[in-house]
Image (cartoon, rainbow, N blue to C red):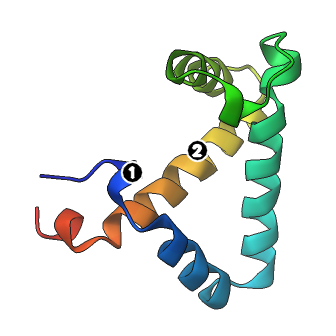
Amino acid sequence: MIPALEEVDLAGFWGRFGEAAPPFLRLGLRSSVWALTWLPVPLMATPRPFPRLSPDERESFLQKAHRSRSYVLRQLVTTLKVTACFACMEDPRCRSV
C-alpha cells in the first residue's frame, strides 16, 4: 500500500533534496512553497496562510489554484505535486508497489 504523504520521511527528503538539487531548482521550489503558503489570503479572502487552513479549505484552495486561468498559479500547484511525488517515491513502500 502506498503511504500517505504524512507517513513519508519528509525531513530526510528535504535534507537530501537540499544537498542534491541545483541552486536554481531549490530557489524555484522555495518560491513556489512561499507563494502557495500565502496565496490563500487574497484568493480565498482569509487572513490565514495555507498551513492554518482546515483540510477541506486546503483542498478547496488547491483545486481553485489548479483551475485558475493563471498559468503561473497552475504551475505552482503542479510543481508542488511533482515534488510530493518525488518525496513519496523515495519511500521504499512506494517503490515496492
Q: What SS does tag 2 mark? A: helix
> Closer to the camera: disc 2 or disc 1?
1
Q: Position of residue 67 (x, y in %)?
A: 62, 20
Q: Quadrant of residue 66?
A: top right
Q: Residue at x 55, y 84 (%)?
A: 16
Q: Residue at x 68, y 43 (%)?
A: 75
In the foreground, 90 or 8: 8
**Location of residue 96 with respect to 31 vertically, above or below:** below
The three-letter amino acid code for the residue at tag 2 is Thr
**Location of residue 8 with respect to 52 vertically, above or below:** below
Where is mark 1, residue-wise? Answer: 5
How many marks do you count on the picture?
Answer: 2
Indicate which disc, 2 or 1, sits on the residue closer to the N terminus: 1
Q: Position of residue 26 (x, y in %)?
A: 74, 73
Q: Residue at x 78, y 24 (%)?
A: 40
- Residue furthest to the bottom in view is 19
Residue 78 disc label: 2
Which quadrant is home to the C terminus?
A: bottom left
In the foreground, 70 or 2: 2
Whether the residues at callouts 2 and 1 have beta carbons within 8 Å, the answer is no
Q: What SS does tag 1 mark? A: helix
